[in-house]
Amino acid sequence: MMTNRSAVALAVQRGLVESAYRDEIPPPLLLDALRRDVEFSLVDTTTGGFSQVNRFQMLVYRTFGEGSWLSISAPTSSGKSFILQRAVHDVITSADAHTVVYVVPTRALVQELEQELRSRFAGAPNVFITSIPQVPHGSVSAPVVYVLTQERLQLLLTEHADFAPDVLVVDEAQKIGEGPRGILLEQVIDQVGQRKADVRTVFASPMTSNPQVLLDHAPPGRKTQSVAAEQVAVNQNLIWVSQVPRKAKRWTVELCINEETLPLGQLDLPQTPSPESKRLPMIAAALGGSIGGNLVYVSGAADAEKTAVQLAEMFRATLSNDPELAALVDLVQRTVHEKYALAAVLPYGVAFHYGNMPLLIRSEIERLFRSGKIRFLVCTSTLIEGVNLPARSIFVRGPQKGKGKPMGEMDFWNLAGRAGRQGKEFQGNVICIDPRNPHIWKEPPPTRRLRYVIERATDRVFLNRRQELLDYIAAGTPRGRPKEYDPLEYAFVYFLGERIRFGSLAASPRMAKYDLAIVNELDAACATGMAPVELPTEFILRNPGVSPIAQQGLLEYLRAKKAIEEAIPAEPGSDDALDSYMRVIGIISQHLSGDPLQLTYPHALLVVNWMRGYSLARLISENWKYWKDHGRQLPDVIRRTMADIEEYARFRFAKYSACYVDVLRFHLTELNRVDLVEEIPRLNMWLEFGTSIATQLSLIGLGLSRTSAIAVSEYIPEDNLDLEAALARLRELNLDTVAVSPIIANEIRRVRGDAVA
């Protein structure tokens, strides 16, 4: 208890413990408490104040300070993020490190962490915090903290061959086991280590049995340590809710403890939960009531919207006139669509939250949920990715992580870790509905928290799909069937990288754990596959996940093309941009991505308008003009547009267009057409941030969301401002005279350093 100070403070606040409770502690115990206060306190070098931490956090902090490679494993909400941010702050402000890279798995986490770090470094204004994968001009002498996804880090490493951070922090490091993105994460970790052997590296993951496996990436001779903990700051109750036989409205409520269930009572619903889609929202409404702090987990964006509408209908008598909810409704209608379902449910204290929504809207939803103004938040697997959104109760019914894929135990407990708000509650509830129904729960809900095994995605391919991989290479890495081939393609390129670095796969330390005969078989397949490839080996490292065999096929196509100028992508603002990108996307689909050619036009339209910096509302409007005549409904077009931006424009096309540009540059150099090489635009940054306008990119680099950057840029005439000039312009802006949402105005104030209204 004495080191769970937030629980003690809550007990005092609620009158469960006297504020002067220490006066009643016997002297020997009081001396011990005082000793702990000193032992578990950190000095803030910028303010001179003290902050108290728990035993686990202090161990992490001290081990981090030793400079060895460190792997941390602890349950969600155990304080990992807090202490890592504090450690990063201290190594930067003490000049023990100059450049830090903090890797997180999603853009939502990028924004959340970037804001948290800006607040933490507010007392050290000379430290530059950025999520832009670019070495900042004019700020090179200042310490820099980059907050990046693995894709952005790969882009940074590609664009700046001499970039090497002093500290690398990998949050949610268990994602190294998740498919192609896990393989990419492994590659960028390796690249950083190869560039700087003494880089201080820290991995953070949920409660796992083998956190030390992540330390295999450490250079030979480096000291490695792992720190594991099982403690949680808030208790979590696992509750089962099941329908009483023959009674549609009556449900039993049971508490699960160590695989046993204890009856708590019965619940009578006001209406029959039929069809079955009503069960989850009705029980959430009945148990959550008007208290707030309720998360309702569903498996996809469409389900999130439907469930939120169902919940809102149950609270039609509680229409809110809250000005902050009204401001968010207005922002949603302006920046997405006037008929977007979110605008309809917000006035009832209900919202939904999924990965492809604009970051500014998601952030405001999260803020209003924490404040209690949004009482029910329907969410998808984005919440498992580490977004810090604790709740009083979480409601789940046969949860899936993606269509048709039941949620695994590790993700279940990662989700459950959001139940319970440290400093606000002593406990949280994880409420499983229909837990004994095998049609809903393919596997019964987990009842005992176990440590889970981290398995690299490369290991999974090598051990479980090795023959498929060999056949795939022998067939020349065919295009098409992306979901099936993507893990094989990423693994092939990863193993090629190991072969290039060490001369053979057998010489790679990473392959020593495998059977030598099998390693040699894969090595021979890689050698055969690479035999016809003329492109430089550096292309393999520059383009992870793109087969060099496919790249060679693209090169041969370009060599046969007579009008090579037509292969050069146009600037997004040019009149012929749509025609140009239709040609480019057609070539990429045929030779690199394997995407259906019938999607060339809508993909080209999206990519061009995205890079032009069009607002999301305008992109949706343009798509609706096309798709309404092709049988799609408006809600589907809204979701599909947001998904295509994230999954196609910012990921798939960004990945393949970068490779396309590399091969095109190589071919033009062959032709001695340096004049044309200089015409090729650098698309990767424009695609990642959704604009080709330098001023808008600078505004995003300062910490504004794309939504706010585009809105405020209408009031800034210059289109080529760098970071310093953009900040100066932003500070000159009179927010009383510009017609922007108050939510956007508050984001601008935060970036400027003003007091937020």
Image (spheres, grey):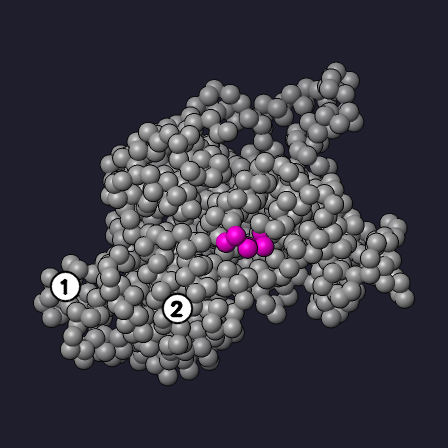
Q: Amino acid at mark 1?
A: Leu
Say which element carries label 2: helix
Q: Which mark is residue 676?
A: 1
- Mark closer to the chain start, 1 or 2: 2
From this view, report whether residue 303 is shown above or below residue 319. below
Q: Which residue is mark 2?
A: 602
Task: Give yes or no for residue 340 being in the magenta stretch.
Answer: yes
Judging depth in this view, the residue of 464 and 620 nearest the camera is 620
Say which element carries label 1: helix
Task: Give yes or no for residue 483 being in the magenta stretch.
Answer: no
From this view, report whether residue 656 is shown above or below residue 356. below
Q: Residues within 10 Å of mark 1 (few under 14, many from 20)?
A: some
Are the residues flagged by discs 1 and 2 in contact, CB closer than 8 Å?
no
User: What residue span does the magenta drawing correspond to?
Assistant: 337-342
Q: CA distance from mark 1 to mark 2?
A: 28 Å
- Determine whether, in the image, residue 524 is placed left or right of residue 742: left
From this view, report whether residue 414 is shown above or below residue 93. below
Q: Residue at x 39, y 43 (%)?
A: 711
In which image quadrant can residue 644 be found? bottom left
From this view, report whether residue 242 is shown above or below residue 428. below
Name the mark nearer the viewer: 1 or 2.
Answer: 2
**Quadrant that contains the N terminus:** top right
- Determine whether, in the image, residue 196 is placed left or right of residue 254: left
Q: Taking the image as drawn, is residue 445 in sight? A: no
Q: How many numbered dots are placed on residues in this image?
A: 2
Judging depth in this view, the residue of 296 and 178 nearest the camera is 296
Q: Residue at x 39, y 76 (%)?
A: 598
- Determine whether, in the image, residue 373 is placed left or right of residue 583: right
**Where is residue 459 drawn, in percent x and y?**
48, 67
Q: Residue at x 41, y 61 (%)?
A: 622
